[in-house]
Image (spheres, rainbow, N blue to C red):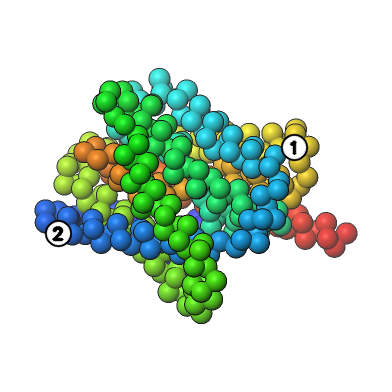
């Protein structure tokens, strides 16, 4: 049943963190120290992400600029436009804070690991997927704060300056990432010897952030504000958004004449949003705002995209195997 629903261990643990935060939220002085610990963990996480990224794959993939331009357009233009167009419908249905979270999700970069993994399973252009997804995350550290400042916080605080947020995100995410790239020749061989420990730290860092974010939201009365009906409407909104963006990511590359391998890479890199970068960014960008409500849409969208992409990747993989036999 869990395999059918594409619920892996990490997804189940995400749900456990939400339940745990609802029952035993961290608060007060403990929340302060937990926040410091989480910040350190996220910095190490992005250091490891930098060390994982193969320079050879980047050099090979970066030459395919048309593919990267289309993924960039889907991620940072089409997604935000769809999110802004949905405002007259979603804001009255979900409320201002949840709509902010939905729009923030539209401003986020693509995923890295799952985009590459699904592209590989579906027999797509893995080198370009590595480069495109990584580029999306790096450039997103600068574009996302600007979009948030213009379309969300700019309405609330007219004197909001994205520069401070960009500096914080650069120090927390980008600098460790670059440092990981520099030290890759020494760090990556050691990471290969302990893959299970690296994966546990990778997922554990995100779980810590989610637990901390939801703890603060629960203390502030999250579940008194978000009803079951509102939650179902949010799931529906995320599902509709994913359907629209996937159709665009499927047919636009065909119309532009990309080959099948490139179409697969564009589809998986251009239709997804990152939870790993999204939650840390939200912590920096939405200080003083209901963080739990703002990260709830990306948590829901993250699970839906994994379930749908898993099914599609397996289907395309079987199609490729049939063609190879022919």
Q: Which residue lies furthest to the top in this view?
A: 88
Q: Report the side of 73 relative to 220 (left or right).
A: right
Disc 1 packing (10 Å; few <14; some 14–19; many ≥20)? some
Q: Quadrant of residue 141?
A: top left
Identify residue for label 1.
254
Q: Which of marks 2 and 1 is in front?
A: 2
Q: Which residue lies furthest to the bottom in this view?
A: 193
Q: Name the N-terminal-most of marks 2 and 1.
A: 2
Residue at position x 65%, y 59% from top?
57
Mark 2 → mark 1, Cα distance in angstroms: 53 Å
Which label was assigned to residue 320? none
Query: Which percent across, then down, holds residue 302?
Result: 46, 48
Residue 185 vs 249, above or below: the answer is below
Residue at position x 11%, y 56% from top?
29
Query: Which percent across, then down, holds residue 80?
Result: 48, 30
Residue at position x 78%, y 45% from top?
259
Query: For the residue labelled by badge 2, is the local secondary structure a helix, a strand or a loop?
Result: helix
Q: Would residue 269 be visible to someone looking at this image?
A: yes
Which label was assigned to residue 30? 2
């Amino acid at each position: 049943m869990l395999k059918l629903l594409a619920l892996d261990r990490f997804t189940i643990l995400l749900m456990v963190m939400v339940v745990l935060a609802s029952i035993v939220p961290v608060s007060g002085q403990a929340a302060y120290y937990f926040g410091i610990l989480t910040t350190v963990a996220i910095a190490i996480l992005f250091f490891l992400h930098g060390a994982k990224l193969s320079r050879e794959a980047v050099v090979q993939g970066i030459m395919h600029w048309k593919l990267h331009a289309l993924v960039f357009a889907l991620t940072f233009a089409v997604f935000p436009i769809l999110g802004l167009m949905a405002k007259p419908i979603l804001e009255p249905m979900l409320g201002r804070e949840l709509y902010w979270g939905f729009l923030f999700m539209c401003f986020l970069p693509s995923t890295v690991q799952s985009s590459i993994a699904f592209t590989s399973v579906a027999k797509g252009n893995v080198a370009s997927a590595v480069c495109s997804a990584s580029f999306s995350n790096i450039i997103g550290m600068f574009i996302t704060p600007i979009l948030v400042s213009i379309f969300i916080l700019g309405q609330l605080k007219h004197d909001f300056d994205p520069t401070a947020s960009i500096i914080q995100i650069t120090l927390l995410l980008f600098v460790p990432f670059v440092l990981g790239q520099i030290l890759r020749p020494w760090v990556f061989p050691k990471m290969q010897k302990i893959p299970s420990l690296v994966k546990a730290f990778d997922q554990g860092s995100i779980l810590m952030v989610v637990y901390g974010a939801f703890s603060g939201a629960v203390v502030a009365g999250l579940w008194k504000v978000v009803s079951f009906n509102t939650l179902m409407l949010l799931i529906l909104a995320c599902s509709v958004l994913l359907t629209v963006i996937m159709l665009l990511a499927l047919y636009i590359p065909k119309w532009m004449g990309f080959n099948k391998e490139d179409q697969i890479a564009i589809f998986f890199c251009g239709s997804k949003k990152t939870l790993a970068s999204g939650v840390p960014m939200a912590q920096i960008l939405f200080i003083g705002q209901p963080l739990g409500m703002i990260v709830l849409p990306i948590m829901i969208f993250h699970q839906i995209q994994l379930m749908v992409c898993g099914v599609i990747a397996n289907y395309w993989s079987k199609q490729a195997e049939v063609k190879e036999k022919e």
